[in-house]
Amino acid sequence: MRRFAMLLALAAASFPAQGQGTCEELGRHRGLGSLSTSTVAPGPAAASERLYLSYLYVNHTLDIVAVDPATGEHRVFPNPVPDEYGAHGMTAGPDGNVYIGTLPHAHLLKLDPKAGTLEDLGRPAPTEQYIWELTTGSDGNVYGVTYPEARLVRYDPVRKTSEDLGRMDPLEQYARWIAASDDGFLYIGIGTVKANIAAYEIATGRSRRILPEAYQTPALARVYRGEDGRVYGRVGAAHFRLGGWETTPIPASEAAPPRARNRLRDGRLVHVEHGKVRVADPRTRDAVEHPYSYAGNELALFRIGFASNGVLYGSSVLPIYLVRWDERTRTFPAIGALGGGEVYSFLAKDHYLLMAAYSAAAPLMQFDTRRPFSRGGGEANPRLLAADIVPGDWRPEAFIHGPDGKVYLGAVSSYGKLGGPLVEWDVDAGVVNRFDHVVDDQSVISLAAWKGLIVGGTTVRGGGGSRPTAKEAKLFLWDPAARRKLFETVPVPGASAINNLIVAASGMVYGMAGETLFVFDPARREVVERTQMPFRAAIYNAVAAGPDGRIWGLTREGVFVIHPETRQVTWAAKAPRPITGGFALRGNAVYFISGASVWRCPLPAAAGESP
């Protein structure tokens, strides 16, 4: 830690004077964040009800919104912990209050509808980042489940005390779902490397994992309270009835649907969607609609990229809106919605903007920049591809033009799994091929094209919840014609990830692994130099060669430059605000993201002072 602090101090001291104050903000994006949870609970007046909704805004602050189903009017409650940007857990407590579990620091909040206050109750488990779901137990206490240690936490509304009840699994990271039975048990859905269900007996404090071994596959087990009042579990297509310490497999037809969280006392269901509040009676099908005027907040952008026509596009985080810079208004308005996650990589090819995304309408998308955005029918734009070939929960960090006219991607694998793929996409033919475990149990996260080959870099990590088996990241050479790996090596001993690769004009490959810059000679197949950089790590897939051959890239603190003639790394410009994403280079300027805004920094004519 002390060494890292010294490096940051050295980095700050090394920013060149000409880099200060030269960056300009191009515009910001505002939109409706991801609706992560909701529930009906008491309102401010006696017998009144509200639909409470939680909207997630990465790198900003969550919004809790109360909607009056009788009028559609809404109220936003200020977040007492501004750094908490989301909440997946929400339940109506037995005391008439609403309890909310947050991320990324796992706070518990209490919304008092009568007082109109949102209060921070602290962190029930200081080790945790997410409180994934909340429920009220048969004892009247509020219970929640967490990540990354799969813990069960409790809050007593009478005594106003919190308690960490411990891990529900010794190895798994995700305790994702929780449901309470009427006979004093709680059930917790666990995963992702090995699905399981934990039963917790409130009276004794005992817990036990009860899912039969045959169903303990790489997945997340889900548990829920059904409309019939019983508790059910599910893993993939397998369904279970849960009672006491028992898990009973049942046909899907015998599993009751989950209890509706949007049901009013009179049985009507309230929905918020597309700018409307809709209250419908499922028995009579009568419905009433009101305008919904909540317009959202600053919504973080995740990745940007230029199309071949010079237009700058980007994508927001949770959910995905495809945005496009409007130079006249200095904003990044949305032109269409593409799913619940984020676009990890953009690539321009001819008149197409190619996208690789997580939790999107499709893992790969092909947007024709000559035509308007459209999600409908045969004229859909973008075209959606590869849902049957690559998983929707991958993280496609690397995206390049290959030496054979095709494009190539590298990605971190799905939840609970190792061995993220290398993907070949023939855009003209619309054909996608996938190659898993190019390096055993490692994910491909950086790529570069050298002559007729592809150079790849890996990370030892896999999808969320997985446990690495390898210790060191690998560099490999891939032959696209033969579709096989020719060579692999450890370029930086001890490094767990190689998150950037680029080929210089000299033919040398420059790579980044943590604080180390390495130079690889692909002809000799050896690393010829290693240099310590003046920062901890670069942002993934965030390097490009400028017009004069120098290599430019991003860290959280600013813009750096690699001088191929000396193989030195120096600072070029300090970012006015922390850089949260990127990356685009066009002409003599580099573009990056800071939260909901996009910035442009001109490339200095000369590099900064040597660190």
Image (cartoon, helix red, strand yellow):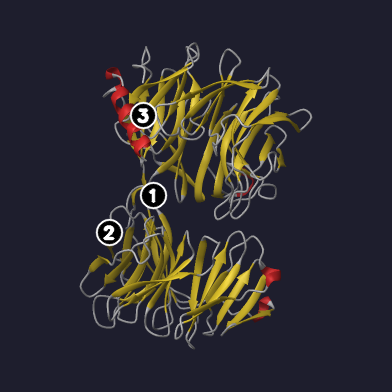
Instruction: Compare marks 3 and 2 and give the one earlier in the sequence.
Output: 2
**Foreground pick, 220 / 193:** 193
Q: Disc 1 marks which residue?
A: 58
Q: Secondary structure at mark 2?
A: loop
Q: Which residue is mark 2?
A: 79
In this view, the residue farthest toward the right is: 482
Q: State whether residue 274 appears in this view.
A: no
Q: Residues within 10 Å of mark 3 (few under 14, many from 20)?
A: many
In which quarter of the view is residue 13 placed?
A: top left
- Amino acid type of the residue that numbered disc 1 sits on in the rendered structure: Val
Q: Which mark is residue 558?
A: 3
Q: CA distance from mark 2 to mark 1?
A: 14 Å
Residue occupying image coordinates x 46% and y 60%: 147
Q: Position of residue 304 (x, y in %)?
A: 46, 35
Question: In the displayed structure, does residue 210 sit left or right of residue 598?
Answer: right
Q: Earlier in the sequence, mark 1 or mark 3?
A: 1
- Residue 156 drawn at (x, y percent): 32, 78
Name which residue type carries label 2: Asn
Q: Nearer the viewer, residue 540 or 312?
A: 540
Q: Position of residue 140 (x, y in %)?
A: 37, 83
Q: CA distance from mark 3 to mark 2?
A: 30 Å
Identify the disc placed on residue 220: none
Dividing the picture into quarters, in which one does residue 96 lie? Answer: bottom left
